[in-house]
Image: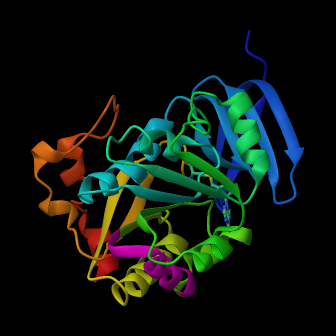
Amino acid sequence: MKADLWITEQQTEDMLISFRIKEKLHEEKTDFQHLSVVDTYTYGRMLFLDHCVMTSIKEEFVYHEMITLVALNTHPNPEHVLVIGGGDGGAIREIVKHPKVKTATLVEIDGRVVENSKKYLPEIGAAFDHPKVTVLIDDGIKHIQEHKDEYDVIIIDSTDPVGQAARLFSAEFYQNVYEALREDGIMVAQTESPFLEKDKQLITRIHQDLKKLFPLVKLYLAYIPVYPTGMWSFTLASKKHDPLQVKPEDIVAINTRYYNQDIHFSSFVLPNFVADLLK
Ligand code: SAM
């Protein structure tokens, strides 16, 4: 008999998502946010920050493959990669699999996310100790200002644009990302859901801000079942290389469960209502 125990995220003012839980594994108030880890029947162990779903064992591969491998396969030589946020470790785990990556730097503001991911989500936090990886517990806003012309790929794997993450979606921050990238660098940011009114405006604004800086700005989609509406967007901005000009035979997809050559290209095919946001 399953206990009547549930955890609920208020996704919008008018929308909730709930998961029946087997067990609450951990809960704490860090210096930055409320953090909890629960074991759910449908998605296994899940990480929540400020009561919002971050990731889960059963479906995390979609997000972590898609936020990393599209850019890593677009850049011909992605040697030095930076992740801002990403404290669960999933993005870093995917990055170090790529044979051309030499260094992967993670800048996560809240060390307790890293520690709890190592302990409760070891399948996701599997690469923090990899020889190519450097973990810095710091504000991504500060780090990006201190590093110029240094990275081939920068991935902004942040929480939603509120609190300490809000500035990770600003035009000023993107200017600093541009300057931290090398002359043919690429950045990718998770840019929320095209189905939500508040996010539609964000997607349009981000696209416009990035178009002022980068010659190539493209949006691509993936399907994240635990995120609001399930349709999720990523915005890729590139100083030179076009993701749609990659030779299919050059695409590296090692042990992936979502990303593949066809997905690399098809994820950029947009429904009309999404394409309209970018006009
Ligand atoms: N959506 C992601 C996923 O599916 O895994 C969540 C990635 S991760 C949990 C998001 C991280 O961004 C959080 O750990 C949060 O602490 C971090 N973060 C928020 N603002 C930040 C900042 N200014 N600098 C660095 N990290 C930040």
The residue sitting at the top extreme is 1
Q: Quadrant of residue 62?
A: top left
Q: Quadrant of ligand 1?
A: bottom right
In magenta stretch: residue 175: yes
In what quadrant of the picture does the C terminus appear?
bottom left
Is residue 224 or residue 169 the one in the foreground?
A: 169
What x and y, as percent, mark residue 101?
Answer: 38, 48
Q: Residue at x 49, y 34 (%)?
A: 59
Q: Is residue 274 left or right of residue 116?
A: left
Q: Residue at x 63, y 43 (%)?
A: 88
Q: Can I make out residue 27 in this image? A: yes
Q: Residue at x 63, y 71 (%)?
A: 143
The residue range painted magenta reads 172-185
What x and y, as percent, mark residue 74?
Answer: 25, 58
In magenta stretch: residue 108: no
The residue sitting at the bottom extreme is 212
Q: Main secondary structure of the magenta part?
A: helix
Q: Is residue 114 left or right of residue 223?
A: right
